[in-house]
Image: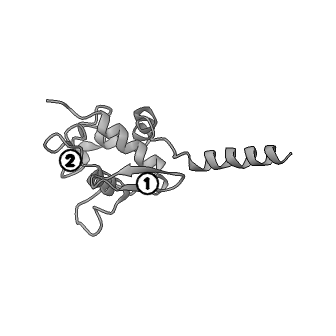
Amino acid sequence: MTRWIILGLLGGVAVACAAPSMPQPSEGQALYMENCVQCHGVSGKGDGPWASTYDPRPADLTRLDRNGQFPTAHVLSVIDGYERAAQPGQDMPEFGLLLEGETVPVDTGDGVLTPTPRPLAALMVYLESIQDEG
């Protein structure tokens, strides 16, 4: 019986130590289609049906790479609203629901894994997947 208790405890430790997996682009694409497509368009180029009502127009999300590097920290801060705080003319809404739920470890560019809400990380992973190579 003692052996079963020990095996049960070890199994619990293994589950507790397993890091949550990063979301796949498809998970972020679903969030994008629900929250972003009206302004940024299906293609992500800033050509959604509401785009013409904004000045400046919504950003082209397929050209976020900077010198071949995806700006993870910047993208996360724009989506969660931190980057836009107190800036006039910034009409992009804040997405509070993207800040809820389980967290996943995201390297924001400094080599340190930062706990990030899974929906926010999923959207970031999707945006990284649609970067225009040219």
Outermost residue to the bottom? 86
Q: Secondary structure at mark 1?
A: strand
Q: Is residue 51 left or right of residue 124?
A: left
Report the residue marked by disc 2.
Answer: 57
Q: Residues within 10 Å of mark 2 (few under 14, many from 20)?
A: some
| Residue visible at 29% across and 57% down in the picture | 91
Residue 41 appears in the figure: no
| Residue visible at 13% across and 29% down in the picture | 134
Residue 90 appears in the figure: yes
Report the residue marked by disc 1.
Answer: 116
Tell me where residue 83 sits by quadrant.
bottom left
Q: Which one is closest to the eye, mark 1 or mark 2?
A: 1
Q: Secondary structure at mark 2?
A: loop
Residue situated in front as seen by the camera: 29 or 19? 19
| Residue visible at 51% across and 55% down in the picture | 100
* Amino acid type, residue under disc 1 in the picture: Thr
Tell me where residue 133 sits by quadrant.
top left
Residue 22 image point, x, y percent = 45, 41
Q: Is residue 59 left or right of residue 112?
A: left
Q: Tell me the CA gap for discs 1 and 2.
A: 28 Å
Residue 108 image point, x, y percent = 31, 53
| Residue visible at 16% across and 39% down in the picture | 68
